[in-house]
Image (cartoon, coloured by chain):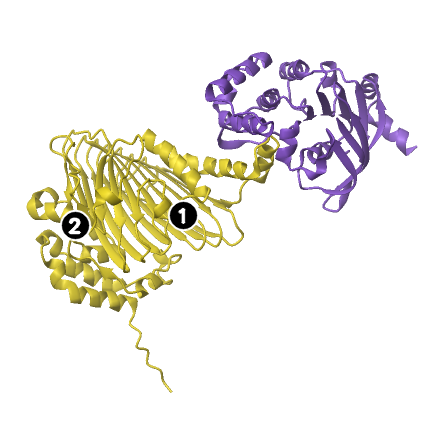
Chain colours: A purple, B yellow
Amino acid sequence: MLSIKNLRASVEGKEILKGINLEVKAGEVHAIMGPNGSGKSTLANILAGKDDYEILEGEVTFLGQDLLELSPEVRSRSGLFLGFQYPVEIPGVPMVNFLKASVNEHRKFKGLAPLTAGEFLKLMRSKKDMLHLDTELTNRSVNEGFSGGEKKKNEIFQMAMLEPKLAILDETDSGLDIDALRIVAEGVNALKSPENATVLVTHYQRLLDYIVPDFVHVLYNGRIVKTGGKELAFELEEKGYDWIKNGIEN
Amino acid sequence: MSVISEKISPTDRVVTLFEQNREILNQGSSPILNRVREVSMKRFIQSGIPGFKNEDYKYTNLQPAFEKSYNQELVRESGLINLNEVFKCNLPELDSHLVFLVNGWFYSGNNPGAELPKGVVLGSLEQIANEKPELLQNYLNRQAGLSNDPFVALNTAFVKDGFFMFVPKGVAVEKPVQIVNLLSSEANLMVTQRNLVIAEAGSQVKILVCDHTLTTASFLFNSVTEVFVGDDAMVDAYTIQNHHNQSTTINSSFFKLQHNSNLVTGVVSLHGGLIRNNLKVTFSGEHGEANVNGLSFTDKKQHVDNYTLIEHSSPNCLSNQIYKNILDDESTGAFSGRIHVARDAQQTNAFQRNNNVLLSDKAKMQTKPQLIIDADDVKCSHGATVGQINEEALFFMRTRGIGEKDARMMLMNAFAHEVVQKISIETLRDRIDELIEKRLNGEVSRCHTCSYQCNC
């Protein structure tokens, strides 16, 4: 589904990604872990299409297409979703309008007719029920005045509405209390299917208590330095990132 | 060698125009209008057309507009236009009392006042000043006459007609009154229009003014509106400006608020070459409230200047100003907002905000808040921002599949919406949202294609 080969990228002349290789197949859950500043968020942003970065080398294919050639909106419509570490507040844009525009763009891309107001509200209600969300979030402007937990729940809600083939969740667990974490994790699990895949970018092992990954990758200094099964996450939690750092430097 | 310039200054040109037309100006007009002409002309001459040195006109140069030659329509040209043919304003769902003015002259052909509640007067200023001077003699020029603005004085010197509205004590006019000001001429035209609205104690009225150009000639539109809001009265007054880019609009509005009265007013500048809006609100009774808003969209070389003055002369009043501008291309904008709290106006609440979005590197915005506070127990604030479209929000929206152009549009609409939502007429609010979207899409470029559905 997603294939990253030797991806190198820099921002303002500083090389952040120094040759990333990653293969994600349908039905898989990958966790990318690593200390602060290792390049995790950069990788997530580059995949979503943020243009603050310069691609130095490498290629990324997503469902057979050259991902790096596509605009962020086409990536989204093709089935890629980025859950933001810091979801943006957009005062004055009502959640409902935003989601409706978003869902209908996705439908248009697939050659489907836009949803009527009634159909859209019905879809929204069913997804809210599935995620046990309170109805209040959708009555407000996008993320405006939302708490950290509400913003993250809102990201999962958008993901549920758009049903992406590949979801990249950037530090979705950060800033969440244990209840919010459970709701977010349950949402991700509920949306999991053999046809789609999830990449969790996380600093802590905590989220992985709720979402069990098939693969764990450790990103350090712009490279994936270790890959293993879910047990790698426990090992990391126990030994800390110094274990990885020392392993490399020695 | 010395060169003697034979160029006539724009101020002298206007003076000559006045001298030449003195007789015709006075002819047929009420003494109420005529008696202030000469003194107003003197006041105009004192300052003349302001240049850059005039602090009040620092950012708006009206000299070039006055260097052009204009015709004037100082006599009503009856039957010039069959309005019912050229202008079918079917603002959908907006059920209103519809009034037309052509080149400053009130048009009574469609019997605009027919369905108004008993006692309400709506008609031509010229006619009512002649026939019922007692209705307006205590109000006309009582606010404008105190102004030092040269264009207000010029308006008073040249006034022939405009609209007049009187809402008697306790009467609520349910349907909005929609006043459509049309400018139509083959040759360049200077138009002077004078309006007066009197809302007596406990009355209610909602007025929507739409400014349009129907032909491509250069227009110089100098309009003055005085509004009196009586005790406990509620007045909503909105203006939508949609003139083509060869027009100059000077629009001065005065509002006087009595005890416990309420005013909501807003100017939406969709289009117009050069627009200067002067606005003054005076609280002359306690517990008055004024919500004053402005919204403008400019591109190419357009210029919009909003100049406001809120006079808190009485205690316990509230004023709230929000002005927003979206500027593209090489367009420029200015906002000067002065709040004056008089010495005894304790417990005043006065707020002001000016937010601006620049869409291009060449667009410019000047903003100048000014608070003069002579009382010690007041709550006042002001703030101004000039910025670009929020790139983070744009990226966020694009990652949800919304195209860049649509995302920009949604963000600009959101920016404008804060002002639009202040409008109390719901159907109008929705309509203005639509108009703004069309404006931002570049669909409202000339009045001929304007979405007010003037089938012209």
| Disc number placed over residue B128 in the picture, else none | none
Where is residue B16? Give x, y as percent. Answer: 21, 68
Q: Nearer the viewer, residue B88 or B281?
A: B88
| Vertical order, A123 against B141 (above or below) | above
Residue annotated with mark 1: B445
Quick check: can you spot residue A17? Answer: no
What secondary structure is found at the residue carrying circle 1? loop
Instruction: Check disc 2 and give the amino acid type.
Output: Gly
Residue annotated with mark 2: B79
Instruction: Check disc 1 and give the amino acid type.
Output: Ser
Packing grade of label 2 (10 A; few <14, some 14-19, many >=20) is few
What secondary structure is found at the residue carrying circle 2? loop
Kindly identify the residue that appears in the image at 11 percent across and 47 percent down: B127
Quadrant (top left/top right/bottom left/bottom right) for the N terminus of chain B: bottom left
| Vertical order, A237 against B248 (above or below) | above
Quadrant (top left/top right/bottom left/bottom right) for the C terminus of chain B: top left
The chain that hosts pointer 2 is B
